[in-house]
Amino acid sequence: MAFSHGPRRMTNIPAWVQLNLPRHLALLAGLALFSGIVVRVMISIGVPDHPDARKSHSQVTPKSGGVGIVAAFLLGVVMLYRYGSVSRLGEGYFLGVIGAAMLMAAVSFIDDLFDLSFLIKLATQFAAASVAIGSGLWVHLFGLPYFGLVDAGMWGIPLTFVFILFITNAMNFIDGLNGLAAGVTLITCLILSTIAALYSGFFVYTAALLLAGAVLGFLPFNFPKAKIFMGDVGSQFCGFMLALFGIAAARYGATPLSFLLIPLLLSGVLFDVAFTLLRRLFAGDNLAQAHRSHLYQIAQRSGIDAGIVALLHWGFVLIGGATAAGFLLTPAAYKLPIALAPLAVQGLWAAYVVRRARRTGLGKW
């Protein structure tokens, strides 16, 4: 990640963005329509997701609606590669993004069909991350409050690996209630696209807009009532792409942005996953075993409407967006407390959910 000692100044919206905004919005709408058509097809095909003790739904519902997200996004990326000379990365980086995305999507879809083991999924994520990093998509300059830029050298590669794998799995873990993962992805992409536009990060601006359109076509089929779930092909793909957007924002815009942008926007998701993993680790639980003890799941099981829980997580993204704006605009001396602000919100949310779980007698969760 990179930031200067002084505050960043948001530039006016670049003329290139202003001139092409109607076209970009039309592309977003077109991709949403295309995504929705593919999702409709997937509903008809009906890859079934059967209820069980670790799932929130009570009747058989088709899954793999994320195929529509993947198909629409890749269509947009192909169009970007063909026509978007301003927005695309260098060819090596660009092909790395496409290759990694296709590998992740293909194996995730196979997982939806045949329920692959966790180790196979992790190996696929590692391979996809290797493709992206091998093409040059990794970060080595990290900005630290009070220290400025620190060059991690080749240590940036394993750090980037950890970042990609954690974001990918976090989005996969959070996909347990209608509209939660899809809504979080959509709002994250819209905010990220806006920030990237203001800082002339043309690739991130356009790519985030493409993913927003793809998710927008899926969301009406998943929220508030689910006709289909996105499945691993959707949740892992969205997480993987958001991680890559974070890396690209930190390196390849006209003004490199902070590596913390995506963690700030996904603060609700990342806190939930980290809190749950640590709690299960200290409790001696098997971390690889499926469960229903994420904070958002406990909240729903304690009686909070699932739609309300999803909307709260959408709100957490908006809080993260406001925090990201403040982080970019303030002097370096104030960046750390601003970056930590979402933790206060998440701490209050966790305390409320834990208290509610105890009062409603959920027992060991």
Image (cartoon, rainbow, N blue to C red):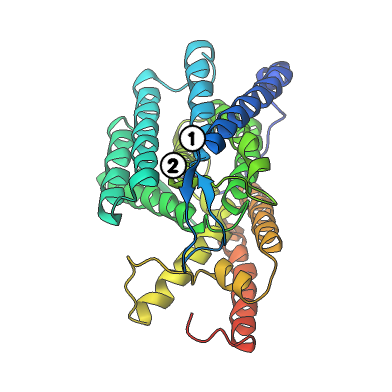
Residue 52 placement, left or right of 298? left
Crowding around mark 2 (Cα neighbors within 10 Å: few <14, some 14 to 19, many 20+) is many
Residue 124 placement, left or right of 230? left
Query: In the displayed image of the protein, which residue is found farthest to the top?
Result: 83
The amino acid type of the residue labelled 2 equals Val
Q: Position of residue 108 (x, y in %)?
A: 38, 42
Residue name at image x 50 percent, y 45 percent: 63
Find residue 298 and name its label.
none
The amino acid type of the residue labelled 1 equals Val
Q: Position of residue 89 (x, y in %)?
A: 44, 23
Q: Nearer the viewer, residue 237 or 148?
A: 237
Q: Position of residue 352 (x, y in %)?
A: 65, 78
Q: Earlier in the sequence, mark 2 or mark 1?
A: 1
CA separation in Å, label 2 and label 1: 6 Å
Is 210 placed above or below 301 here? Answer: above
Is 53 placed above or below 9 here? Answer: below
Residue 353 placement, left or right of 137? right
Q: Which of the 4 image quarters holds residue 29? A: top right
Is 156 placed above or below 347 here? Answer: above
Does residue 89 appear anywhere in the picture? yes
Residue name at image x 47 percent, y 84 percent: 364
Q: Secondary structure at mark 2?
A: helix
User: Do the numbered discs 2 and 1 sit on residues whose CB atoms are within 8 Å?
Assistant: yes
Q: Nearer the viewer, residue 71 or 225?
A: 225
> Which residue in the protein does label 1 denote?
67
Find residue 233 and name its label.
2
Q: Nearer the viewer, residue 207 or 364?
A: 364
Residue name at image x 40 percent, y 33 percent: 101
Q: Secondary structure at mark 1?
A: helix
Residue 150 placement, left or right of 238? left
